Image: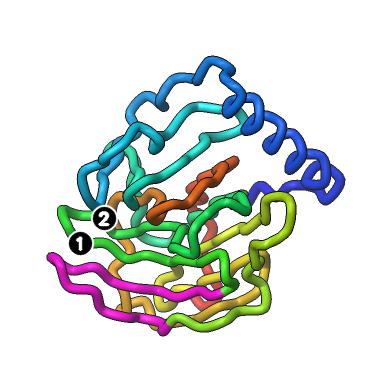
């Protein structure tokens, strides 16, 4: 697992904010990431949405909500998926987070919101089934200040369980059979969310787990 050192995080947020302000001031937009697919919830009615390559990571500004994924990337067995996301204060109070088990119109989402709430949902062929009900979570950052808030979302899939964390705080621990997580993975960025995704990491667990 790759974790950022605290001093680097203090420096990173202002740098990302500076990059965003430069882009808004008319700096040339960087290219859309190669291989990244953007599946919109609804047709876009303006040009304010988009995903651009802005190292470290991608900058995402959504009109309608969307799923972002690369069909070449999938996870199965014992694994972790972790993403570091900076959400800017002009975002709407919509969902953002990690998508797992993506196949057709079906997917499992570990999602947070700028109001400090988090939950786990399963989208199954147009129907939405709550897996973990939305609730306020202390470790989920609340937007509203002058700068972006940082959320590190992590899903640990073990042979018999799935654990969901935000900024190191446990949101839920469930039996593995509770939610489908094997398959393609990616990101969920809801309607009106303005965010910078600095990391999306897949960690495969090769060493035997306890009890194996």
Where is residue 19, by image quadrant? Answer: top right
| Residue 90 picture location, percent across and down | 57, 51
Residues at circles 1 and 2 in contact by the CB criterion of under 8 Å: yes
| Whether residue 67 can be seen here | yes
* Left or right of 76 in this view: 94: right
Q: Which residues are magenta?
A: 117-133
Give the left or right position of residue 57, taking residue 190 as reference.
right
Examine the residues drawn in magenta and state their main secondary structure. strand
Q: Secondary structure at mark 1?
A: strand
Residue that sits furthest to the top in the current view: 28
Question: Looking at the rendering, which quadrant does residue 34 occupy?
Answer: top left
Judge whether residue 121 is colored magenta: yes
Outermost residue on the right side: it is 7
Query: Which quadrant of the figure has residue 101?
Result: bottom left
List the residue tagged with mark 1. 106
Locate residue 21 relative to residue 160 in the image: left or right: right
> Which residue position is annotated with label 2?
102
Report the residue at 57% width, 71% height from top.
115
Give the residue at the far left of this rendering: 125
> Of the numbered discs in the image, which one, if any, rests on residue 52?
none
Please say whether residue 84 is visible from this viewpoint.
no
Residue at left 44%, top 63%? 94
Viewer-proximal residue, 128 or 35? 128
Q: How many marks?
A: 2
- Placement of 210 over or under 16, stated as above or below: below
> Relative to residue 44, is residue 192 depicted above or below?
below
Q: Residue at x 41, y 45 (%)?
A: 62
Q: Quick check: 172 above or below 144?
A: below
Residue situated in front as seen by the camera: 211 or 7: 7
> Is residue 100 within the magenta segment?
no
Instruction: Work out how far the residue at label 1 is from the one at label 2, CA to CA, in angstroms.
Output: 6 Å
């Amino acid at each position: 697992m790759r974790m950022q050192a605290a001093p680097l995080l203090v420096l990173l947020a202002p740098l990302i904010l500076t990059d965003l302000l430069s882009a808004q001031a008319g700096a040339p937009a960087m290219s859309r990431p190669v291989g990244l697919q953007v599946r919109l919830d609804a047709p876009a009615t303006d040009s304010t949405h988009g995903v651009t390559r802005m190292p470290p990571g991608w900058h995402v500004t959504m009109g309608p909500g969307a799923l972002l994924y690369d069909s070449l990337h999938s996870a199965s067995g014992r694994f972790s998926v972790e993403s570091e996301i900076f959400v800017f204060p002009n975002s709407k109070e919509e969902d953002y987070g990690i998508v797992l088990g993506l196949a057709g119109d079906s997917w499992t989402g570990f999602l947070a919101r700028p109001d400090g709430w988090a939950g786990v949902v399963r989208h199954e062929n147009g129907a939405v089934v709550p897996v973990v009900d939305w609730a306020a979570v202390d470790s989920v950052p609340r937007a509203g200040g002058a700068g972006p808030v940082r959320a590190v979302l992590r899903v640990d899939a073990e042979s018999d369980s799935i654990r969901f964390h935000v900024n190191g705080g446990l949101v839920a621990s469930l039996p593995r059979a509770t939610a489908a997580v094997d398959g393609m993975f990616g990101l969920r960025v809801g309607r009106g969310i303005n965010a910078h995704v600095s990391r999306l990491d897949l960690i495969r667990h090769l060493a035997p787990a306890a009890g194996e």
